[in-house]
């Protein structure tokens, strides 16, 4: 027993800050969890006795390495690669790889920490990890992307494996990059195993992994609305991003009869008052996944508004919001405007897209607010199912995976309700508290059972 009292939030964050200088995103992610779970720990002293939160907030391992590759002109280029293995109490480390110039150790630590809770919430046996590089894929040729992925895997292969750590995609890493990394892993190790998820269907991928994160975030939105006898049908939805998660969030919103009106990229956002329909979405998919162009082209093609200079869509009125681009894209001020404009539900498709100030605004207003670790867990959920299919060397049918994804999201919603309900005649659910405590309890109990390691 290392401490005689459960630390206050301020004491806990003060220590965390000192141990992790210059890592604001990591501090933010841990603080959001600590706000929810410290009270629970006080009421359940075994978690304090075993220093569970302190241990969860210290990654098991952080690997950092040099990645060398040659560009098309023959110049030698150097980037930094990482893998953060946060916690494997309930299963092998699992989580995506991000290629973006902003990537640093603190950002990957925040993502690996979040992933630990998210993976626990799915009900599947997966620990939490995350990796990436400050490599910028923008403007690179296919051949350059391939050489970079091969260079990255040339070091990463030592740290991963189907029962050790199973990476997948994230920002800047989709099917193409997963294919190149899988090929290099196979070449180095001479083993054909499910070491990565998000693979192509021809070589061990799972039906609906591509769709799962965006679909799941909208299923969660649907479940929150259903809990208060509402439905997304006919509601206007503000979506950010135009990558994998955003595209499939828009697709599922359309299936459910909602009206998505915005999408964005790092240049700015488009606002289509008439709504983004199936045909316009097909254009976005072709633009982003094949031609790798900019979202401004949508405005030219369909006569919609384009707001540049990196503008975000949060001032556009709508009842629903699904932020699907990147961390901290919704500020406290944005949240105030959204509430004034009549927002009733927010489902985080991205990881930590709302600042703590924005989260506090949504909680104070008691609107439906789903944190990413609950709302976007459908992607890693189907990744877990890809692992199972790879182990059994079979592929399940698409219908079965659609049903399992729906079940996973429903299960997460139920867990949030269990730990986040206000009770006593109120139907309000604090989904942040619910997700944090539910994820915490599952991982914490496994850690206690496995001793001080
Ligand atoms: N792909 C997946 O299965 C999962 C992804 N996520 C999260 O969802 C978010 C989006 O990821 P993906 O769609 O996979 O990536 P992606 O690479 O397919 O798309 C990323 C999108 O975000 C936009 N973006 C990136 N940085 C931006 C910035 N600074 N400002 C404005 N827009 C920016 C890009 O233009 C692009 O539209 C990330 O937060 C990621 O961590 C979460 C769970 C699973
Ligand atoms: O599918 C996976 O393993 C990872 C997905 C991911 O990176 C995430 O949930 O943020």
Image: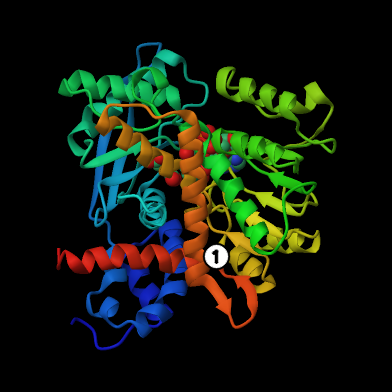
Q: Residue furthest bottom?
A: 4
Would you say 117 lies left or right of 411 here?
Answer: left
Disc 1 under 8 Å from ligand 1? The reply is no
Which residue is found at the position 40% from the left and 17% from the top?
Answer: 144
In the rendered image, residue 286, in percent from the top left (x then y), is placed at 62, 20
Could you tell me if residue 410 is visible in this image?
Answer: yes
Which residue is found at the position 54% from the left and 58% from the top?
Answer: 371
In the rendered image, residue 429, in percent from the top left (x then y), is placed at 59, 69
Against 97, is 70 above or below? Answer: above
In the rendered image, residue 270, in percent from the top left (x then y), is placed at 75, 36
Against 294, is 38 above or below? Answer: below
Rendering quarter of residue 299: top right
Q: Which residue is mark 1?
A: 431
**Quadrant of image for the N terminus:** bottom left
Rendering quarter of residue 186: top left
Quadrant of ligand 2: it is top left
Q: Could you say whether the residue bearing mark 1 is in a helix, strand or loop?
A: helix
Labels in figure, total: 1
Q: Compare residues 40 and 341 and report the one nearer the observer.
A: 40
Would you say 435 lies left or right of 66 here?
Answer: right
Q: Compare residues 443 and 339 and report the one nearer the observer.
A: 443
In the rendered image, residue 391, in percent from the top left (x then y), is placed at 25, 33
Rendering quarter of residue 159: top left
Would you say 389 lies left or right of 323 here?
Answer: left
Q: Counting other residues with Cα less than 10 Å from the Cα at mark 1, is it few (<14), some (14-19), or many (20 or more)?
A: many
**Quadrant of image for the C terminus:** bottom left
Which residue is found at the position 41% from the left and 74% from the top?
Answer: 37
Q: Compare residues 348 and 277 and report the one nearer the observer.
A: 277
Could you tell me if residue 171 is visible in this image?
Answer: no
């Amino acid at each position: 027993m290392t401490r005689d009292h459960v630390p206050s939030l301020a004491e806990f964050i003060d220590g965390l800050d000192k141990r992790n200088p210059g890592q604001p995103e990591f501090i933010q992610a841990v603080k959001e969890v600590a706000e929810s779970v410290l009270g629970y720990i006080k009421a359940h002293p075994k978690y304090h006795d075993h220093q569970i939160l302190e241990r969860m907030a210290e990654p098991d391992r952080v690997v950092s390495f040099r990645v060398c590759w040659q560009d098309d002109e023959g110049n030698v280029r150097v980037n930094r690669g990482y893998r953060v293995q946060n916690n494997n109490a309930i299963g092998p480390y699992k989580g995506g790889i991000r290629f973006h110039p902003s990537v640093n150790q603190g950002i990957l630590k925040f993502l690996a920490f979040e992933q630990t809770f998210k993976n626990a919430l799915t009900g599947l046996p997966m620990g939490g990890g995350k990796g990436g590089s400050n490599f910028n894929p923008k403007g690179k040729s296919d051949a350059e992307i391939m050489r970079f992925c091969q260079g990255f895997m040339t070091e990463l292969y030592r740290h991963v494996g189907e029962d050790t750590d199973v990476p997948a995609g994230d920002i800047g890493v989709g099917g193409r990059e997963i294919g190149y990394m899988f090929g290099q892993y196979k070449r180095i190790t001479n083993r054909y195993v499910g070491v990565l998820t998000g693979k192509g269907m021809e070589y061990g991928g799972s039906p609906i992994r591509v769709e799962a994160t965006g679909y799941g975030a909208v299923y969660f939105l649907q479940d929150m609305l259903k809990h208060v006898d509402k439905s997304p049908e006919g509601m206007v939805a503000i979506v950010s991003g135009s990558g994998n998660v955003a595209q499939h969030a828009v697709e599922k919103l359309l299936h459910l009869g909602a009206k998505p009106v915005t999408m964005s990229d790092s240049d700015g956002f488009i606002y289509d008052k008439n709504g983004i329909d199936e045909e316009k979405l097909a254009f976005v998919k072709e633009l982003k996944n094949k031609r790798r162009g900019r979202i401004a082209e949508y405005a030219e093609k369909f006569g919609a508004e384009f707001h540049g200079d990196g503008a975000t869509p949060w001032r556009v009125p709508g009842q629903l919001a699904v932020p699907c681009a990147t961390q901290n894209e919704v500020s406290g001020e944005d949240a105030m405007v959204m509430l004034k404009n009549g927002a009733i539900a927010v489902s985080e498709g991205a990881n930590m897209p709302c600042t703590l100030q924005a989260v506090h605004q949504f909680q104070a207003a008691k609107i439906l607010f789903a944190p990413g670790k609950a709302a976007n867990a459908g992607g890693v959920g189907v990744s877990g199912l890809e692992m199972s299919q790879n182990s059994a060397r079979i592929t399940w049918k698409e219908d079965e995976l659609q049903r399992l994804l729906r079940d996973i999201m429903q299960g997460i919603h139920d867990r949030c309700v269990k730990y986040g309900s206000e009770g006593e005649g109120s139907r309000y659910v604090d989904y942040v508290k619910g997700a944090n405590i539910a994820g915490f309890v599952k991982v914490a109990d496994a850690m206690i059972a496995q001793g001080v390691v």
